[in-house]
Image (tube, helix red, strand yellow):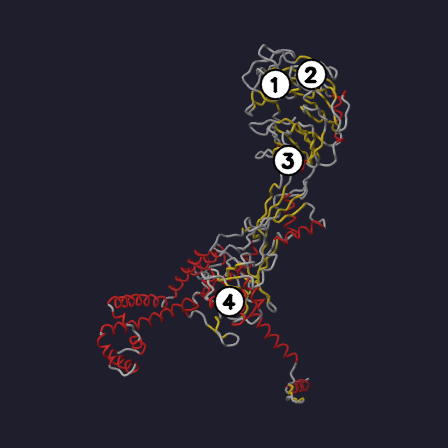
Amino acid sequence: MAKKNEKKASGAEKQPVAAGHEVIDEIDVSSELSASFIEYAMSVIVARALPDVRDGLKPVHRRILFSLHSQGIRPSSAYKKCARVVGDTMGKYHPHGDSAIYEALVRLAQEWSMRLPLVDGHGNFGSLDDGPAASRYTECRMATPAMAMVEELGEDTVDMRPNYDGNETEPEVLPAAFPNLLVNGSTGIAVGMATNMAPHNLGEVTSGLCAMLANPKITLDEMLEHIPGPDLPSGGIIAGLAGVREAFETGKGAFVMRAVARVEDVSARRKGIVVTELPYNVGPEKVVARIKELVNAKKLPGVSDVKDYTDRKTGLRLLIECKTGFNPHGVLDELYRLTPLQENFSVNNVALVDGEPQTLGLLAMCRHYLNHRLVVTRRRTEFRLRKAEARAHILDGLITALAAIDEVVALIKGSKDSTVAREKLMKKFDLSTIQADAILEMTLRRLTSLEVTKLKEELRDLKKSITELRRLLGSEKALKKLIGEELEKVSQAFATPRRSRLLKEIPASAVESAALEIPDEPCIVALSATGVVGRFEPSAFKGRPSKHDVLVSQVHTTNRAVIGLVTTSGRVARLSVVELPVASAASRGLKAVEVFGLDAGEKPLALVDARPGAVVSLVTRQGLVKRVPSSEFPQRLDTRPIIGLKPGDALAFAESLPEARSEKADLLLVSSDAQLLRFPQNVVTPKGLPAGGMAGMRLGEGAHVVAVGVFEEGLDAVVVTVSDAGSVKVSTAGEYPQKGRGGGGVRCHTFRKNESALVAAGIGAPAPVALGASGGVVEYPQARSRRDGSGTPTDAGVSGFGFLRSV
């Protein structure tokens, strides 16, 4: 085996072989591949893909900012073409292609990518779903926060190195007056490694850094009090703080990003989900496309449509319309599960530390940044001290010369040239070369007393500055205090309120027990005297809608059944119950006009059961009657005529009963001339929708039907009548004899001298409730009198009747 290895080794060390005019070196392929790959990998890792822990920038971003700074394209200057910036960056510092440089520049300007943008863009810089315009069409300049990254470059704060061709110099790292790596995060793919760092809130990060300066041994739990979690540019919800803590501790972890969404009324009958904030790096078009794909594949049955109303004025707004019969909160849970409305963020905090990639936790990143700022601040202080001492040295010489100006002038005039004058000045006044040169270059205006005073004041101020700078350099504690004060100033200048909400755990559901489909459970649909319609759970139904309202109609049904609303115009609007608004103690529903889309002047009259097996009884103001089986109702959920009305006539009554009860019940019609007719409903033959009514009650001249009720044996129903003089009479419905259809009926209220007509009547069991003209419930005498008796005078004005509870 040893001999074989010796042969291989000797083979690798063969002398170059001449082939024509070329010399070919024989090398080991595996060694060459290994060495070349390592060189390539390190080049990508160090020079392309990973950010430096100190300024949080990749080389391309650093060179873009340095190019802008060098060209003087600052926040106060005019915008310049991005192509110009890209060309300068590529030609001087980053020879890796203009497209890569432009993409990096664009990202620095995008508010949805950067928590604190470093470039101020003008023009189309793209969106999350679309790329930017070409660099020749867009313009840019440095954003104000970027100045805090570069403004200390001229004070020898960082090392400068030659550029790729040695003709220019560039900074190895920027001074970075704020922790850009934590604030803006970073993402990149190198060779064999990648980085994915979340953005954070500047105010929180600076608060944490100041706490670390005050207590270098600060624990992670203490730091979390200042930096509770990431703060994404897009806002949204961050759920799962255990993963955030793990990332802060080890440099690797994961958390869930959720969109901010709420359930709203799309229309009077439909619910929708409005999305106002999306997860980080998720665009609205991506969400819309995914939802439509799932709907077409029948994997998202609760969604009927999705619309994007996003614009610059209102910001992000996606409207997801829910289908009838589906719980919008359950639909939202499905959207979170199946669409980009919920995404995971995997944290991998890999950054360059002294040129080597390392995975860093929160405390390590903060310490590295503070160490960098400590170096920058010390070097800046040393630079300022050298500059101040040099200036003070010159001022000492100038003031010395001005004190003996006549002698200085004579000495200079008597010199052959400036070299001789310099030597004489240095020898005569014990000056340095620099001081002597400054005296020789001094202008005549410096000879004025005011200029001399200014020089002395400047020297005095410089000496104070020198003392302060030396104090800073002599105390690391003082330097750290200065760093903390500068961080607070940066925070005050650029920090914004937190955008992302933090949740400890991932919510299991938008609401507790949010089933996708609304179950077909019993419910009550009620219509009030003021025209409000609502769907109630039986346990939550209290009856009376409000203090100033009463019920006029109600249907006991189920959530997934169909009901009808009969209007005064003789039409029936058929609607699925589940489309009606859910009423509660806080909200009793919506106006029926809005829910059913009624015409102008058309008023809701009564709710009827549209399920098979029910029969609807109708009575018009002119005394015509009709019965319609629910099976005759249109199958489509729309509005159709339910009775053919004559000109000038209108519906006065509508009520539905199961067919068996309808055949046994009587109709009671009360006319304005105080007549009451009672006859069996079964004498009225059921007809289809288009048919008109048949004669029900023969009315006197000028009379009309004011009230209708259904009477069933065994119920203690009453008849309450109200005259135009305000007298009220209560009688028992069973006392009125049953007559034939088409008759005039019997007297139900004897008029006094000041009475001429009935203005209202109520029939029912329990006794109906009177509603006053002002909207409130009014009291009336409860004592019953004979069926043809007179009423009892009252002060209460009665405009109508209704019921307080479920019947």
Q: Residues within 10 Å of mark 1 (few under 14, many from 20)?
A: many
Label 1: state its secondary structure: strand
Label 2: state its secondary structure: loop
Disc nearer the start of the sequence (2/1): 2
Depth check, front residue: 143 or 329: 143
Amino acid under label 4?
Answer: Arg
Q: Looking at the picture, how far across and down is residue 201, in whole percent?
A: 50, 56
Give the CA distance from mark 4 to mark 2.
Answer: 95 Å
Q: Which mark is residue 759?
A: 1
Q: Which residue lies at the image location 50% right of the left edge and 77% below the top edge? A: 166
Cβ atoms at labels 3 and 1 below 8 Å apart: no
Amino acid under label 3?
Answer: Val
Disc nearer the start of the sequence (4/2): 4
Residue denoted by label 2: 699
Cβ atoms at labels 4 and 1 below 8 Å apart: no
Q: Quadrant of residue 588?
A: top right
Give the CA distance from mark 3 to mark 2.
Answer: 36 Å
Relative to 392, say whether 716 is above or below.
above
